[in-house]
Image (tube, rainbow, N blue to C red):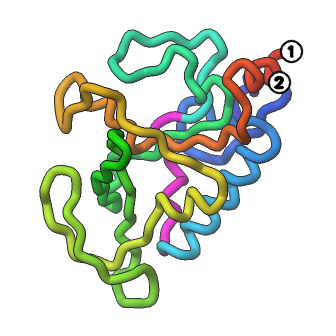
């Protein structure tokens, strides 16, 4: 039995995560579409487990990199499972900001899925495999990554400021507008 929805304007996502809900409409619909797309084009259900999704409207954290006004509270963000061995994360710098592109190692590696590429991950490790561009797939359905916060590091207490796992589909709504929609 699914947990109780935080708002009647959220939908249950059949995902392994603490609060498996997204805002009704575009975020919920486009998450399902992304999950189906990745499963078909990368060969496995990468989004069956997430690190974070919905948070309560009163959520607060003192952890570095956690926003006070989090899009998770709005029901329009998810963090993918960073422990997945399928992820290959590549640093991209543009306009004074650091972002990260996520590739997935396709399953299987027999040549039917993905593109054979050699990339260097953000730790400096070269990876050669048949890869699927998760960031591009997410973007095609309105899911956008966010830049890393200033002071991020590859390890240690500021690792959470990297934010490479965070995707949001805000539909152009401000945090306040989204919260008002959910909890008016």
Residue behind mark 2 = 181
* Image coordinates for residue 97, horizontal then vertical, percent: 35, 40
- Against 176, residue 93 (above or below) is below
74 magenta-colored: no
Which residues lie in the magenta part?
43-52
Q: Quarter of the image holding residue 147?
A: top left
Q: Which residue is mark 1?
A: 184
**Quadrant of the image occupied by residue 162:** top left
Residues at marks 2 and 1 touching, judged by CB atoms closer than 8 Å = yes
Please provide percent x and percent y for residue 40. 58, 74
Residue 59 vs 182, above or below: the answer is: above
Side of 56 where 180 appears, left or right: right
Q: Position of residue 19 (x, y in %)?
A: 61, 30
Dot 2 surroundings within 10 Å: few (below 14), some, or many (20 or more)? some
- 2 relative to 105, above or below: above
Position of the C terminus, as image quadrant, is: top right
The number of numbered badges drawn on the structure is: 2
**From the viewer's perspective, is 105 left or right of 184?**
left
Q: Residue at horizontal 56%, vertical 13%?
A: 59
| Image-quadrant location for residue 137 | bottom right
Mark 2 element type: helix
Q: If the image is split into quadrants, where does the N terminus sit?
A: top right
Residue 51 included in the magenta stretch of the image: yes
């Amino acid at each position: 039995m699914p947990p109780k929805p935080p708002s009647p304007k959220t939908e249950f996502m059949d995902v392994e995560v603490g609060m498996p809900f997204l805002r009704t409409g575009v975020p919920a619909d486009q998450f399902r579409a992304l999950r189906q797309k990745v499963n078909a084009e990368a060969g496995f259900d990468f989004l069956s487990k997430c690190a974070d999704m919905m948070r309560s409207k009163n959520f607060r954290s003192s952890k570095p990199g956690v926003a006070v006004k989090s899009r998770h509270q709005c029901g329009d963000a998810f963090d993918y499972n960073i422990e997945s061995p399928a992820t290959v994360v590549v640093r991209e710098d543009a306009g004074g900001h650091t972002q990260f592109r996520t590739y997935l190692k396709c399953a299987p590696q027999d040549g039917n899925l993905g593109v054979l590429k050699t990339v260097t991950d953000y730790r400096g490790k070269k990876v050669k495999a048949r890869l699927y561009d998760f960031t591009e797939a997410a973007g095609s359905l309105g899911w956008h990554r966010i830049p890393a916060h200033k002071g991020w590091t590859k390890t240690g207490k500021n690792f959470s400021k990297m934010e490479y796992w965070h995707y949001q589909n805000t539909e152009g709504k401000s945090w306040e507008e989204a919260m008002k929609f959910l909890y008016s």
